[in-house]
Image (tube, rainbow, N blue to C red):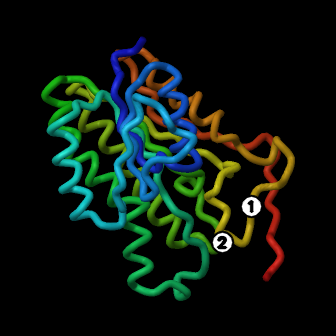
């Protein structure tokens, strides 16, 4: 088993974060899961520890992290939380813009800021961030979402350079459309065929393999796409 035995996972109650938490628990990791929902039926496990934290509240996030880090030394951090914000920029209020940047970008920076001193002290640690294909290529109605994801990608690439000499590996995974609750509130979704979307379990397995890789290498960035890209637009209610 890899040295990473206690994982901190954001977005743990749903979608990609849930699948990752479940995979790590199966492999003997202890998982502390951050989400707004907390404990969910799919993660009823002795080694799962739910933390109900709203990532939109950065002050509360920092405070809660301080308490958590006094009790647990994390070997790895997987950031899977995020939300979709699609539309023309003028459709969003200033408050909505601020909230989107906090949840999709700033919370990852705040968590890393808290975790890194502990990882540097022990000269080891792994950080895996779930980004998006929207960090690689901009698209229509994606000004707000792409801005956050481009920022997240830049943060990860720079962080990887900052941390390498301290034994900390930073990896970024950029998936295309994933079949998950991410699309529940959207006007579009991936096509219905299996090859039209990436499964959350596939991403979870990939993250696990990244965590299992040699401590002497860094898997900098992985881009994933469905084999056949297809988008379906939902009927207006």
**Mark closest to the chain's N terminus, 2 or 1:** 2
Question: Is residue 126 shown to the viewer in this render?
Answer: no
Query: How far across and down, in percent of the image, does residue 141 sit?
Result: 63, 74
The residue under the point 42% across, 58% down is 36
Q: Residue farthest to the right?
A: 193
Question: Dot 2: what SS?
Answer: loop
Q: CA distance from mark 2 to mark 1?
A: 15 Å
Residue holding disc 1: 189
Q: Quadrant of the N terminus?
A: top left
Query: How far across and down, in percent of the image, does residue 218 sit?
Result: 40, 25
Question: Dot 1: what SS?
Answer: strand
User: Nearer the viewer's eye, disc 2 or disc 1?
Assistant: 1
Query: How far across and down, in percent of the image, does residue 211 sit?
Result: 44, 24
Q: Where 124 falls versus 104 (above or below)?
A: above
- Crowdedness near tag 1: few (<14), some (14–19) or many (≥20) residues, C-alpha within 10 Å: many
Which image quadrant for residue 72? top left
Residue holding disc 2: 140
The residue under the point 13% across, 28% down is 121
Asked if residue 59 lies left or right of residue 169, the reply is left
The residue under the point 79% across, 50% down is 229
Pick the residue in front: 48 or 23: 48
Asked if residue 207 lies left or right of residue 98, the reply is right
Asked if residue 197 lies left or right of residue 100, the reply is right
Is there CB contact under 8 Å for labels 2 and 1? no
The residue under the point 82% across, 55% down is 191
Q: Quadrant of the C terminus?
A: bottom right
Query: How far across and down, in percent of the image, does residue 24 sit?
Result: 48, 27
């Amino acid at each position: 088993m890899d040295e990473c035995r206690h994982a901190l996972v954001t977005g743990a109650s749903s979608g990609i974060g849930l699948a990752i938490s479940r995979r790590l628990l199966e492999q003997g990791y202890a998982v502390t899961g951050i989400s707004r929902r907390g404990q969910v039926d799919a993660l009823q496990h002795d080694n799962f520890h739910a933390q109900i934290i709203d990532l939109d509240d950065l002050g509360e996030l920092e405070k809660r992290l301080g308490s958590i880090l006094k009790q647990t030394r994390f070997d790895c951090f997987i950031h899977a939380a995020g939300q979709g914000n699609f539309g023309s920029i003028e459709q969003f209020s200033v408050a909505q813009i601020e909230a989107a940047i906090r949840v999709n970008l700033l919370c990852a920076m705040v968590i890393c800021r808290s975790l890194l001193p502990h990882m540097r002290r022990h000269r080891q640690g792994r950080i895996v961030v779930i980004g998006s294909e929207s960090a690689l290529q901009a698209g229509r109605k994606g000004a707000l979402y792409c801005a956050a994801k481009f920022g997240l990608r830049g943060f990860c690439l720079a962080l990887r350079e900052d941390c390498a000499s301290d034994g900390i590996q930073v990896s970024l995974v950029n998936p295309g459309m994933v079949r998950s609750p991410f699309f529940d509130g959207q006007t579009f979704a991936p096509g219905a065929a299996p090859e039209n979307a990436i499964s959350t379990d596939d991403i979870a397995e990939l993250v696990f393999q990244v965590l299992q890789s040699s401590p002497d290498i860094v898997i900098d960035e992985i881009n994933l796409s469905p084999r056949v890209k297809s988008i379906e637009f939902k009927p207006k209610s």
